[in-house]
Image (cartoon, grey):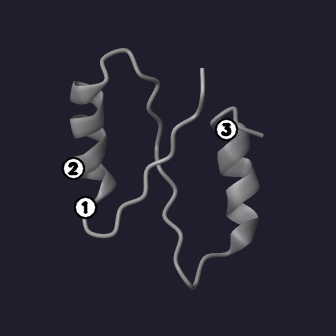
Amino acid sequence: MLPTYMCSYSSPFEVTLPALAAAAPGARLFTGLTLDKDTDYSVIDPWLDKAGLL
């Protein structure tokens, strides 16, 4: 299985994740990570690890 990433500029996860779930039944979806200019980048590796991507 290949990981797929979602980027969103205007739609919050609360809207996008249900739409993805409906479009891809059986897909493994997990909580997103919001990054912006003020992000403490030490949060990225733990998030990737929890998603099984690290």
Q: CA distance from mark 2 to mark 3?
A: 22 Å
Quick one: label 1, few (<14), some, or many (20+) residues within 10 Å?
Answer: few
The residue that appears at 24% across and 28% down in the rendered structure is 23
- Find out whether the residues at labels 2 and 3 contact each other: C-beta distance under 8 Å: no
Dividing the image into 4 quarters, which one contains the C terminus?
A: top right
Amino acid carrying label 1: it is Ser
The numbered mark at residue 15 is 2
Do the residues under discs 2 and 1 have CB atoms within 8 angstroms? yes
Residue plotted at (67% across, 38% down): 50
Image x and y of residue 35, in percent: 53, 69
- Which numbered mark, 2 or 3, is in the foreground of this view? 2
Q: Nearer the viewer, mark 1 or mark 3?
A: 1
> Label 3 amino acid?
Lys
Q: Which residue is labeled 3 in the image?
A: 50
In this picture, residue 21 sits left or right of residue 33: left
Quarter of the rendering containing residue 42: bottom right
Amino acid type of the residue that numbered disc 2 sits on in the rendered structure: Val
Q: CA distance from mark 2 to mark 1?
A: 6 Å
**Residue corresponding to mark 1:** 11
- Front-lying residue, 4 or 41: 4
Q: In the image, is residue 38 above or below residue 14?
A: below
2 or 3: tag closer to the N-terminus: 2
Q: CA distance from mark 1 to mark 3?
A: 23 Å
At 50% from the left and 46% from the top, the residue drawn is 5
